[in-house]
Image (cartoon, helix red, strand yellow):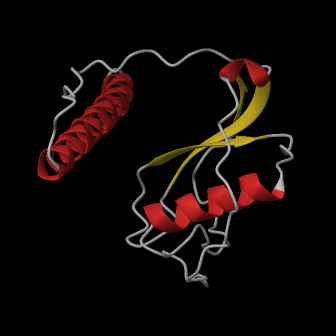
Amino acid sequence: AGAGVCARAPAPASAPCAPAPAAAFPPAPFYHYNGSTTVPPCAESVLWFVKKDPVLVGDMQAALLQRALFELSNGYGNFRAVQPLGSRAIQLVEGMSEEPPPPPWPSVPTYPDMTAREERAKIAASNALNTAGFANDRLQAMDTWERGIANGLNDLLRERDTR
């Protein structure tokens, strides 16, 4: 975990803007690598996709992104000193524009006459489902990776034993 300097106050934004539809972004190359979160505890649990070519945004869009990052990170923002590459591999991948698929887990129902407490519980349940889905995906990826390593070691041991 590296040290970083964090600002504490988001820049003001005058009015929200709607996100651009997926079709507004043509297929483009991205750098992809495994990394960590940019705020404590800096967990190594992030799959980063960084657009190869910069995207220009307006001042209001940048301010809204900054505000969202501060809110999502309890005021830390999105700053961390650059970390050494270590053994991580960086791949160049092609991004495609498409609508996201529905989640593989059921959504939490919404009722028009929910109380504030029920709405908070619904949000907590949705967050829990998203976290569980992410954890399941990571666990499956780790299992696949570990099985690949185990198979490779078994092959090496078999090859050594046949000599």
Report the residue at 47% width, 65% height from top. 71
Q: Is residue 26 positioned above or below 130 on the image?
A: above
Report the residue at 21% width, 43% height from top. 128
x and y, in percent, of residue 132 in the image? 22, 38
Q: Quadrant of residue 159?
A: top left
Residue that lies at the very extreme toward the front in this rendered image: 113
Q: Quadrant of residue 78?
A: bottom right
Q: Return the residue nearer the eye: 95 or 151.
A: 95
Report the residue at 16% width, 39% height from top. 114
Question: Is 144 displayed left or right of 69 in the figure?
Answer: left
Q: Return the residue nearer the eye: 137 or 99.
A: 99
On-image quarter of the C terminus: top left
Q: Return the residue nearer the eye: 10 or 32.
A: 10
Q: Is residue 122 positioned above or below 137 on the image?
A: below
Question: Is 88 displayed left or right of 61 in the figure?
Answer: left
x and y, in percent, of residue 67 in the image? 58, 64
x and y, in percent, of residue 158 in the image? 31, 23
x and y, in percent, of residue 46 in the image? 47, 48
